[in-house]
Image (cartoon, rainbow, N blue to C red):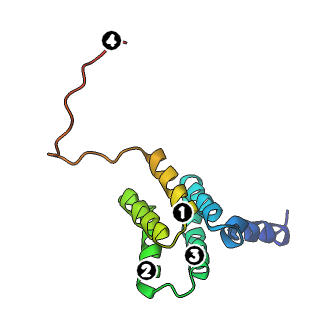
Amino acid sequence: MTVHTVTPILAARDRLPSAVTHGRLEHGLMVCLGLLASDPERFAPAAVGWHAGLCAWLPGIEFSESQAALAALEGLAGPNRIAAARALRDACRRHGLDDVAAVLDGWLAQLGPPPIAPGAKQGPPQPLTAA
């Protein structure tokens, strides 16, 4: 293999998945979330591409809401990913993008419940059962 044959392979790997650039918003978001889990280095470019599609889908979106959506996407990769996913989900619902919101609901369900904050009240202790 020469440099000339490797370069197109590398370029193809760096391209955004077609579901992100040309597909439905919910499919593109599924791909982004999959990349977040399997190939985190490719998540950010894919998320930015998805955001571009979101803005194209919502002509007239305000700067502040566009920036909030992009910040929420970035937050999906951070320690406050649950709050970020909820913020993006709620914004999608406000714009009637229920299929996209459903993708985020599914992702949140896979993450499980958020950890309980120190000092927060919990339910009654559960009895231990013998295994």
User: 42 and 56: which one is in front?
Assistant: 56
Q: Real-space Cα distance between discs 2 and 1?
A: 17 Å
Asked whether the beta carbons under mark 4 and mark 3 sit within 8 Å of each other, the answer is no
Q: Which residue is mark 3?
A: 54
User: Does residue 106 sit above or below 44 in this rendering?
Assistant: above
What whole-number distance in Å separates the C-alpha atoms at marks 4 and 2? 52 Å
Does label 4 or label 3 sit earlier along the sequence? 3
Quadrant of the rendering where the C terminus is positioned: top left
Classify residue 82 by image quadrant: bottom left
Q: Position of residue 88 (x, y in %)?
A: 45, 67
User: In the drawing, what numbered circle is on residue 126?
Assistant: none
Q: Residue at x 49, y 68 (%)?
A: 92
Q: Secondary structure at mark 3?
A: helix
Above or below 79: residue 3: below
Q: Are marks 4 and 2 in contact (CB under 8 Å)?
A: no
Q: Nearer the viewer, mark 4 or mark 2?
A: 2
Q: Which residue is mark 2?
A: 65
Look at label 3 and name its amino acid: Leu
